[in-house]
Amino acid sequence: MSYRDIVLRAAQRAAEIIDESGAMERIEQDGYTRIDPFQIAADSGVMVMLRPMQKLLGAFLGDETPGILVNVDRPAGLIHMTCAHELGHFFMGHGNSADEKIYYGSKAALVEQEADQFGYNLLVPRKLIVKIMQRKHWKREALFRPDIMYQLALRMGVSYEAAAWSLSRHNVMNADQVQQILRTTPAMIKKALLGDRLIDARKEVWLLDSDDQTSILEPRPDDQLVVRLPSHASSGYLWEADSVDELTAQGFQLEPLTMPSTPSADNSLVFGGPGTMDYLLTGGRTSDTTPVNVQFSERAPWNVSSPPIDTFKSSARFESLNLGLTHHARKQLLEGEQP
C-alpha cells in the first residue's frame, strides 16, 4: 500500500467517525472549538485512563473491552493527540500497541502510519479550521502569523507544532513555511502577551476578544486568559467585570494589564495596543462539566446607573486532566452499571 493510499484510507475513516459521532455538532451547535477524543472514545465503548508513564506517550489495548492509556504528564495538546492516535489503532482495526511517539513518517510500520494520519484528521479536519476562522474573522493570510497559529492550536486542543503541520497536510502552506512559523516559539508568544507577568512559560496563554463571544473555550484550570477589548478610556469609559465577587468565587483573579501587545506587520512580536484594554484572568474551576461565564461591561464610572456602551461575554469550560479515568469514561462506566 502506497503512502498516499495510507493517508487517504486513514483520512476517510476519521471523517466517517467525525460524522458518526456528531463531533462537529458540538462545535457548530453548542459553540465549542475542538473535537473531543475522550467523548468519541466513550461513545465508542473505549475506556480512556490517564496515568503517568516513564517512556510511553500512550497505549491501545485491543481486548474484549478495549481501552486506551495516555501519559498524563504531558501538555494538554499532546494528551489529546495521543488519545486520537490510539483511537486510530482502534478504529483502523489494529491490535495492541504501545507508543513512545505518535508522529511517524512514511518509513514507519503501516499501523503507526495509519494511526498517525487518523489522529491528525480526527482532531484537525479542514472543516474545523474553517469554522474557527469564520468565528474569528481570520483570513487565510492570518494563518501565517505565529500568534494566530498559537491561538488556533489552543482552540483546536492540539499543540502549536501539530497545528502548523496540520496546515501543511491540508496544503495550506508548505514545509518551509511551517518551519518559518515554528521559529517563533510558544514561549516567545506568551512573553509578548504577558511581559513580566509571565511566571511559568509552560502554562498556556489564551487571547480572547470580541470574536470569542459565541464560543465556549476549553482551557486548563491553571491556564491564563487575556481578554482584549476595544477601549474608550480617553472618553472616560472603563471595562469592568459585571460581578467581581462571582468571578472570585469561581476561583478567578482579575487584574488589568497595562501593556497589551499586538503583532507587527512583519510577524515580529512587539508591545503596544492602542485603542484596547487588556485584562488578565487566572484561575478558574477545576470541574470540567459546567461552562463558566465571563462577562464585562464598558461604563462611565461616574454614572453607575447608566447603561453600558458595550458588553463582552464568553464562556470557558475548564478541562481538568486528572489521574485516572477521564470524565467521559467515568460517566460511561456509571451509566453501564445502572439497571
Image (cartoon, helix red, strand yellow):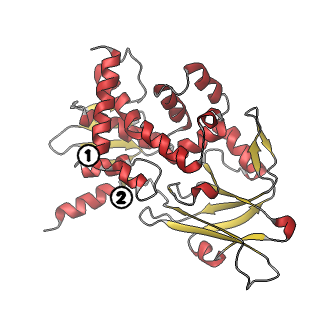
- Nearer to me, 62 or 269: 269
Q: Quadrant of the N terminus?
A: top left
Residue depicted at 35% across the width and 54% down the height? 326
User: How many numbered circles are shown?
Assistant: 2
Q: Quadrant of the C terminus?
A: bottom left
Vertical position of residue 2 compared to residue 129: above or below: above
Residue 20 drawn at (x, y percent) = 26, 46
Q: Residues within 10 Å of mark 1 (few under 14, many from 20)?
A: few
- Quarter of the image for residue 95 reads top left
Q: Disc 1 residue type?
A: Glu
Which one is closest to the eye, mark 2 or mark 1? 1
- Quarter of the image for residue 187 reads top right
Q: Secondary structure at mark 2?
A: helix
Is residue 200 rendered to the left or right of residue 326?
right
Nearer-N-terminus badge (2/1): 1
Residue depicted at 35% across the width and 23% down the height? 7
Residue 50 drawn at (x, y percent) = 38, 48
Residue farthest toward the bottom in the current orientation of the protein: 305
Is residue 20 rendered to the left or right of residue 206?
left
Q: Disc 2 residue type?
A: His
Residue depicted at 32% across the width and 36% down the height? 14
* Camera sees residue 269: yes
In the rendered structure, find residue 20 and report the number of the disc placed on it. Answer: 1
Residue 225 drawn at (x, y percent) = 63, 56
Per the image, the residue denoted by label 2 is 327
Residue 81 drawn at (x, y percent) = 42, 39
* Camera sees residue 76: no
Is residue 300 rendered to the left or right of residue 315?
right
